[in-house]
Image (tube, helix red, strand yellow):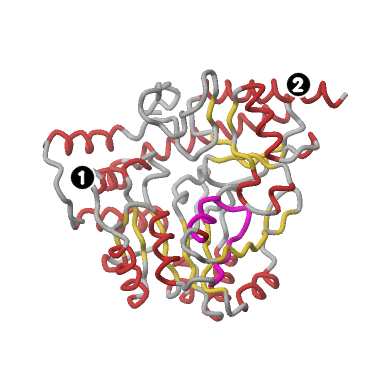
Amino acid sequence: MRYDFDRNVDRSGTNSYKWDVGPGELPMWVADMDIPTAEEVVRAIVKRAEHGIFGYSTVPEEWYRAYIGWWESRHGIIYKKEDLVFSTGVIPIISSCVRKLTTPGEKVLLMTPVYNVFFNCIKNNGRVPEEFELSFDGQGYSIDFDKLEKAMQDPQTSMLLLCDPHNPIGKIWDRETLSRIGELAFDNGVLVISDEIHCDLTDPGTEYVPFASASEKCRENCVVCISPTKAFNLAGIQTACAAVPNGRLRHKVWRALNTDEVAEPNAFAVQAAVAAFEEGGQWLDELREHIFRNKQRVKKFLEERVPEIKLLPSQATYLLWLDGSAFGMKSRELAEFIRSRTGLFLSEGGIYGSREKELCHLRMNIACPSPTLEDGLKRLEKAALLLRENMV
């Protein structure tokens, strides 16, 4: 291994949203890695900073080449230069699309449980979040296509926010599933916004399927949100891309992003993205191995020490979806108990969908050094011991 992912970095004093916690608390919630980005990316940012002038920036050819090359070599899809539109982030893309490509009062479908900020993107723009609950058998999630078709046939439904790989459950949707989603959406006039920000964080040897590659109907009816920020821990750099193969739709997206003033890069956005995609491949592959080892460690630890909490199977992201229903509590109650008694801060499942408020799922971020993970697991075990005492 060339890179060291177990080096602890003190993030205090850096205005970190994740680490804005109380003394002795350990945050393992928001999707923000406690691992420094690739040194190749740091060098590119430092080189740009040393120039000393930070005026308005344009989007150069190298930015397009980096995205096109990465998605062709890594994910087997060829985007053309004209397909790509710069944005300051995936959420700005989604919010702009919701605001400009739907009308007030229309419904936007969500496949829940799903990333909680999607709800904000819809509600804040005067649209109605319509939850389509994924089928859950206690072990994993699937789509009831009869119910999905019925939801899409509603004339008030104009958009679907798709998440692939799916946050928080870590599921990769296969090509057949994506094709069926795309066909239903196309045939019913429902535009698909596909958030693929976690696509580079699959388990080693596992690949995701870009929505636009699943079928021609998918390709002609989608806005794909892609970015190096999640995989390379660059969220604060604010750099992303909307890939829109359909020309007429792309023009509308381009207008939406420019109208909302989220289509211009800051002084570091281009350099960071280019360095990540052109020089960060080995770092990312080693990171994926590290995250996978952390996942296996959590699985083993829970089975041996905290059997009341089950790790649900996943194929991607560094976010684990845990089922703590054996404790007989709701997710918010369990998350608050764990934090108050041990300082371990996990995301409670209730924020990811209405049904989740009645269940007991927790989301755990394991993109951290191994010692940090061990600390988190020991705190989780401490909480379990306290709960067992109350259950006796």
Please tell me which residue is depicted at 36% across the width and 38% down the height of the picture. 282
Distance in Å between CA atoms under marks 2 and 1:
50 Å
Q: Give the quadrant of the N terminus.
A: top left
Q: Categorize mark 2 by other alpha carbons within 10 Å: few (<14), some (14-19), many (20+).
A: some
Element type where label 2 sits in the image: helix
With respect to residue 325, does 68 lie above or below?
A: below
Please tell me which residue is depicted at 61% across the width and 65% down the height of the picture. 130
Give 45 or 91, whichever is nearer the viewer: 91
Please tell me which residue is depicted at 54% across the width and 33% down the height of the picture. 366
**Residue 233 x %, y %:** 39, 39
Q: Quadrant of residue 79?
A: bottom left
Cβ atoms under marks 2 and 1 closer than 8 Å: no
Give the total number of marks visible in the rendering.
Answer: 2
Please tell me the numbered disc located at residue 257: none
Q: Quadrant of residue 311?
A: top right
Q: Give the quadrant of the C terminus.
A: top right
Give 194 or 304, whichever is nearer the viewer: 194
Lower sequence index among marks 2 and 1: 1
Q: Quadrant of residue 2?
A: top left
User: Which residue lies most toward the right here?
Assistant: 392
Element type where label 1 sits in the image: loop
User: Which residue lies most toward the top here?
Assistant: 24
Please tell me the numbered disc located at residue 385: 2
**Residue 243 x %, y %:** 36, 63
Q: Amino acid at mark 2?
A: Leu
Please tell me the numbered disc located at residue 267: 1
Give 24 or 145, whichever is nearer the viewer: 24
**3 left or right of 205?**
left
Q: Is residue 111 magenta?
A: yes
**Magenta residues, start to end:** 106-122
Q: Is residue 112 magenta?
A: yes
